Each structure stands twice: as structure tokens, then as C-alpha cells.
Image: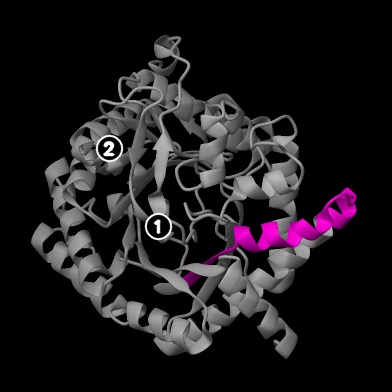
């Protein structure tokens, strides 16, 4: 039971510290939509999504009104489309047609994003996988609400370097096709290692093949709440610091549990997981970088940053697990540059570099996220950056991801704006020494020795 003091405390978190339920994401299986005829397949997909999610936005808004808890986004994730379209799609254009249907279904249900225009290729690509991947630039250029992800590696299978190399090219093409909008297509495209099946956060959400027919996953976020709590921990030792973060994460997760229970009951859809991720926004006071500074760093990126982030990530997970039996997804701390004003300030101060961000991804919940780089960066260089990040995930048995924006026509020091939750980003320098010979090798990087656990 939640007592009166918790209610008062939660109200203060919402009113002054940017606590919110970042997303209610309905995962929908499209397996029963499969058909060898493309037109029938598209009809099946639209009908399944619309009938399943037509009340999602209304219910989210009703819960926000009834409980006074902001429910910022309502989203949909679907089964990876490379699998669903395999029997009907004979070209990349066929897959792009499905993307347009997904976009219409998302618009008609009123959600703000739909994820699952995805392929899982950690050990190799089928012809269907390759067709979908090759269609991504066109699909993201011609849609507004569709998000795409490609899982190219895992601890169990290694890294598919053919897919990594291809994604370097795909990201460049996506940037070029959406250059009139700041290359925003790349902001809706994530490359993963060890992608979770139940992630509610875009752009990487998809409905895993191990999931039920429909499921509700809740994403809760409150960087401002954690920062405010840490203001009382000045000069305290690490034990006190850890306890403060853990207890705060517990309280934040309880809010998500309440919303999850209500949404499940009102929609008649089973509850899946709560993802307690400190996902920042461009709003002042809603920054993971500010939490790190509250711990004692002058800027995110200063010596000690990786240790501080590791502490934060671990205590967030521990607090969340105590609050709910079904914590999943990514859960921890995100470090997207464009979505975090504190990170932007650190980049502009010269304190935070791409190399330091890569080191931080060893201990955070995602990876190199929403980072703008010069538009003339070579596709082989992008592939090399992806390979580095995938290796971190593979060896450390954790999810890592890359969401790079090679902003067309932009150079180091310029700024690119995406608007809304996606924010804006300074264009960061990239190491341009060549890795072409390495990434152009064919085949897979094998799984590490500690992956053999059967």
C-alpha cells in the first residue's frame, strides 16, 4: 500500500523535480499477421495494431488526469518487421510500403512513436533481413513516427561485422535523405548489441518474439528527483550517497508500478515490465549530467565520471528491483548528448569527448546515444565506432547501442536541432584515422570465451 506521506512526497517530485512516467509502450505481436501476399499483409498489420492500441492514448491521458502523474508518451512496439515481411517482401521498396502502413497505424492511434522496424542479425543476415536494412533510409525519410533498430551482436553469438559495415553505409544514407530536417532520420535509428526484447524506450523498442501477444511496458524517469535528493548528501561518504540514490529510485519505481497496474486493468492487456531509466530531457533540471555534478564533478567528463556513473547506474537498478518484481528493459542511466542540457554544456566546455563517452558506456544502460558528428564522416569510420561499442556490450554481457547523427552539411562546432524530447546537439569531432581495412573484412567477430555457459 502507498501511504499518505508517500503521496505527498510523490506530488512534490512531480511538481518541482520533473518526475514523470516517460512512456506507456504497448508491445504487439504481428506473428498472426503473416501472409505471402503483400497487400493482405499490410491490411493485417494495420488492423492488428489499430484494434489493439486504439484506446492506448485515451487511457494514458485518463490515468494522468486521475492520479496527477504526467504520462508523457504513449508508444507502440511490434515484432521485428524483417521477420513479419519475409514471406511477402521481394524488394526493399516492399518493406518501405510496410513502413508507411506502420506510420499510418501509429498516427491513427495517436501515439508519438512506433518501434520495431527492425532486424536481428547478430550471427548473420537472411535475404529478408538485408532487404529490410537496405530499406531503412527510405523508410525513415518517408515516415514521421516509425523507429528502426538493428541488433548486430550479442555475448552469445559474437558480432556480425558484415552487418556492422552495412550499418555504416545505412546511417550515412539515412542522414542524406533527411538532410532537410537536420538528418533526423538517424535520430530514429539504433544499432544494438544484446538488445532486450522488452525495452519500452525509443528508438530501440521492438516486441520480442518471446513476448505474449500483447503486453504493456512502462518507462519511468526522474533525473531531477535524484539530483534533488543528492543535494542533501554534500560531504557524505559513499555509503550515504548510494543509499540516497537507491531509496529515491525505489520511490520513483513505485510510481511506475501504480501506473502499470492501472493501465493493464483499464486496457485489458497484461503488464510486462517497468523500465526505471534515468532518461534526461532538454528541460532544465532533468539531466543525468547534473546528477554527476551533484556528486562532486565540475562537468560530466571530468576524471571520476565513469566511476560516478557506475555508482549511479547500480544503485538505480538496486532501488528499482526492490520496488517491483518485474523490472526489465534497459533500467539505469542514459547519457544521450542532445537530450541532456548538462551533457551539451560539458561538450561545449571541451570536457566531454566521444572517447570519454565511449568509456562511460561501459557502465551505463545504453551507449553512444544521440551524438551529432560531422556530415562528411566516412561510412567506414561510423562502422568502426559501431564495432567498438558492440565489443563493449559483447564482452561485458550488457546492452550497448549506437545512435549517431552524421549531420549533413555540418562541421565540428556547428549545432543541429531536432526539437521536442530529441533536443539539440553540438557537432562533436571524430577520430578520422582510417579503419577501412579492418571493417571491410568479411564475417563475424566470435563470441568471447565466457559466453559458453551451457
Q: Which residues are magenta?
A: 216-241
Residue to which mark 1 is pinned: 206
Q: Residues within 10 Å of mark 2 (few under 14, many from 20)?
A: many
- The quadrant of the image that shows the N terminus is bottom right
Figure check: 55 above or below 99: below
- Residue 22 position within the rendered picture, expressed as x and y whole percent measured from the top left: 48, 65
Q: Residue at x 83, y 60 (%)?
A: 243
Q: Earlier in the sequence, mark 2 or mark 1?
A: 2
Marks 2 and 1, how far apart in space?
23 Å
- Residue 353 position within the rendered picture, expressed as x and y whole percent measured from the top left: 55, 27
Q: Residue at x 47, y 51 (%)?
A: 282
Q: Nearer the viewer, residue 86 or 401?
A: 401
Q: Choose top left, top right, bottom left or bottom right for residue 81.
A: bottom left
- Residue 153 position within the rendered picture, expressed as x and y whole percent measured from the top left: 49, 37
Q: Residue at x 18, y 64 (%)?
A: 104
Q: Choose top left, top right, bottom left or bottom right for residue 383.
A: top left
Q: Nearer the viewer, residue 240 or 125?
A: 240
Q: Residue at x 34, y 50 (%)?
A: 419
Give the SS element for disc 1: loop
Q: Residues within 10 Å of mark 1 (few under 14, many from 20)?
A: many
Q: Choose top left, top right, bottom left or bottom right for residue 378.
A: top left
- Answer with left or right where residue 343 lies relative to residue 41: right
Give the SS element for disc 2: loop
Judged by depth in the image, the label closer to the viewer, 2 or 1, is 2
User: Would you say residue 310 is visible in this rendering?
Assistant: yes
Judge whether residue 52 is colored magenta: no
Label disc, if present, on residue 183 of the rendered structure: 2
User: Would you say residue 442 is visible in this rendering?
Assistant: no
Label total for image: 2
Amino acid at each position: 500500500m502507498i501511504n499518505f506521506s508517500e503521496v505527498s512526497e510523490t506530488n512534490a517530485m512531480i511538481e518541482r523535480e520533473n518526475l514523470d512516467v516517460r512512456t506507456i509502450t504497448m508491445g504487439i505481436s504481428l506473428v498472426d499477421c503473416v501472409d505471402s501476399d503483400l497487400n493482405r499483409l499490410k491490411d493485417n498489420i494495420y488492423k492488428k495494431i489499430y484494434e489493439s492500441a486504439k484506446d492506448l492514448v485515451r487511457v494514458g491521458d485518463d490515468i494522468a488526469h486521475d492520479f496527477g502523474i504526467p504520462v508523457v508518451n504513449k508508444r507502440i512496439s511490434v515484432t521485428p518487421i524483417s521477420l513479419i515481411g519475409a514471406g511477402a517482401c521481394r524488394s526493399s521498396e516492399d518493406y518501405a510500403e510496410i513502413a508507411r502502413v506502420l506510420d499510418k497505424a501509429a498516427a491513427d492511434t495517436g501515439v508519438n512513436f512506433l518501434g520495431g522496424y527492425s532486424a536481428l542479425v547478430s550471427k548473420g543476415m537472411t535475404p529478408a533481413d538485408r532487404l529490410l536494412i537496405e530499406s531503412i533510409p527510405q523508410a525513415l525519410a518517408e515516415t514521421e513516427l516509425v523507429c528502426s533498430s538493428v541488433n548486430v551482436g550479442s555475448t552469445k553469438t559474437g558480432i556480425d561485422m558484415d552487418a556492422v559495415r552495412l550499418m555504416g553505409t545505412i546511417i550515412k544514407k539515412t542522414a542524406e535523405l533527411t538532410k532537410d530536417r537536420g538528418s533526423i532520420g538517424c535520430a530514429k535509428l539504433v544499432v544494438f548489441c544484446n538488445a532486450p526484447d522488452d525495452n519500452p524506450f525509443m528508438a530501440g523498442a521492438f516486441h520480442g518474439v518471446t513476448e505474449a501477444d500483447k503486453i504493456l511496458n512502462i518507462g519511468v524517469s526522474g533525473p531531477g528527483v535524484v539530483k534533488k535528493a543528492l543535494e542533501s548528501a554534500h560531504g557524505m561518504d559513499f555509503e550515504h550517497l548510494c543509499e540516497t540514490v537507491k531509496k529515491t529510485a525505489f520511490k520513483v519505481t513505485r510510481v511506475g508500478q501504480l501506473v502499470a497496474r492501472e493501465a493493464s486493468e483499464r486496457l485489458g492487456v497484461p503488464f510486462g515490465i517497468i523500465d526505471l531509466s534515468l532518461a534526461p530531457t532538454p528541460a532544465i533540471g532533468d539531466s543525468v549530467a547534473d546528477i554527476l555534478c551533484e556528486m562532486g564533478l565540475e562537468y560530466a567528463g571530468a576524471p571520476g565520471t565513469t566511476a560516478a556513473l557506475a555508482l549511479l547506474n547500480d544503485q538505480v537498478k538496486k532501488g528499482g528491483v526492490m520496488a517491483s518484481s518485474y523490472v526489465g528493459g534497459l533500467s539505469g542511466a542514459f547519457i544521450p548528448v542532445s537530450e541532456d542540457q548538462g551533457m551539451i554544456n560539458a561538450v561545449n566546455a571541451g570536457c566531454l569527448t566521444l572517447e570519454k563517452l565511449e568509456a562511460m558506456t561501459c557502465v551505463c544502460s545504453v551507449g553512444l546515444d544521440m551524438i551529432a558528428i560531422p556530415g562528411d564522416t566516412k561510412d567506414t569510420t561510423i562502422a568502426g565506432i559501431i564495432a567498438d561499442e558492440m565489443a563493449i556490450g559483447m564482452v561485458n554481457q550488457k546492452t550497448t547501442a549506437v545512435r549517431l547523427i552524421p549531420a549533413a552539411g555540418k562541421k565540428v562546432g556547428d549545432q543541429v536541432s531536432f526539437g521536442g524530447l530529441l533536443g539539440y546537439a553540438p557537432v562533436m569531432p571524430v577520430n578520422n584515422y582510417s579503419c577501412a581495412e579492418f571493417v571491410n573484412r568479411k564475417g563475424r567477430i566470435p563470441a568471447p570465451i565466457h559466453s559458453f555457459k551451457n
